[in-house]
Amino acid sequence: MAKVKVAVNGYGTIGKRVADAVTLQPDMVLVGIGKTRPSFEARRAAERGYPIFIAGNGSKADFDAAGLATAGPVDAMIASADVVVDCAPEKVGRENAKKYLAAGVRAIFQGGEKADIAEMSFNALANFDRARDRKTVRVVSCNTTGLARAASVIVPHWGVTAWEATIVRRAADPAESNRGPINGIVPTFELPSHHGPDVRTIFPDLRIATTAVVVPTTLMHVHVNHVILTRPPADAGAVIARFRQTARFHLFAPWEHVDGTPQVMEYARDRPNGRPDMMENVLWDAGVRVDGSDLYFFQAIHQESIVVPENIDAIRAMFGLAESGAASIATTDRALSIPTP
């Protein structure tokens, strides 16, 4: 079977990671990236040999002045692709969707867009098969991805009567100097927050309510979860074992002395995947507790990278490139050097 031709429209925090991930897959080829203006990221794309197509209101003259060759307008990139992974800034994807529809090309959108932009919201562990043959798919946000992965473990094994999660949010990504620093803890006065309804675009019957606060860090998000289980396990060990046996979960044992997100990201810097990324849900053995029907657990979410493998699996589902979600996850994770259980 010929490789799926993938275009990545938008080459920022997520787009550059998705583009790199595509080039590592055995069944995909990157046809180019869409970029509005020259930047250090555009230079990096050129250094990697990625064709740069001019998106939005970008100017060829600006790229020429920066010494960056371009391959034409983004419409030409779209026309040459089988699928476009839209990684444009929030709300821009809805405008871009008109281009993809007109070109008759499939499209994947990110969680910054509303759910109705696509036929379905996607998470590889939860609903891979539902994405088969779809024309448009939305990969949910970093926080929703983390919650949906956890629900994919908890719901089928123990059932959920109710779930409450407090999301301790990073204030900005590391490169976003225009958004910080802040010296404070800022409540999000959206009660409950939008994350719970977003999880229900994947698990419609899940009773989950979320709240959020913003804190002065750029490293990760942390979720504080309280889940009331319908069929509780005997102890926390059963829950820990199940998480450890599931792809895209990484648990730290007490002897590793990982106190929080600083050590998690230091661990990520030592991994051989080319970036200090942690694409798995991060949990701590010491941070999982079962008390009767009550399950408590912390999980950390690396906002810059957790959705990257989900985008790859969404492509594979849409084009029928894998027999199952598990098979696709295994292929993706092997290519991205994500350890398997």
Image (cartoon, grey):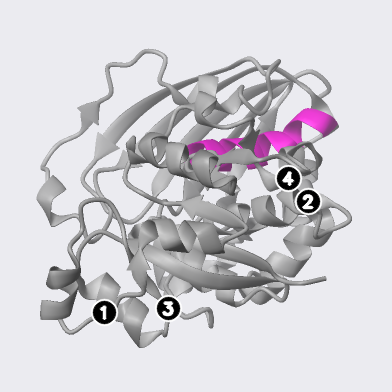
Q: Is residue 153 magenta?
A: yes
Give residue 52's position: percent from left, percent from top. 35, 72
Residue type at the position of mark 3:
Tyr
- Chain part drawn in magenta: 143-156
Q: Which residue is mark 1?
A: 43
Give residue 146's position: percent from left, percent from top. 56, 42
Q: Which label sits on residue 125?
A: 4
Tell me, yes or no, whether the two marked residues, 1 and 4, touch with CB atoms within 8 Å.
no
Q: Which label sits on residue 241?
A: 2
Along the polypeptide, which appears first: circle 4 or circle 3?
A: 3
Q: Main secondary structure of the magenta part?
A: helix
Residue situated in front as seen by the camera: 331 or 78: 78
Viewer-side label of 4, 3: 3
* Residue density around tag 4, few if under 14, some if 14–19, many if 20 or more, within 10 Å: many
Residue situated in front as seen by the camera: 32 or 283: 32
When the figure is inspected, residue 106 is found, relative to residue 293, above or below; the finding is below
Residue type at the position of mark 4:
Leu
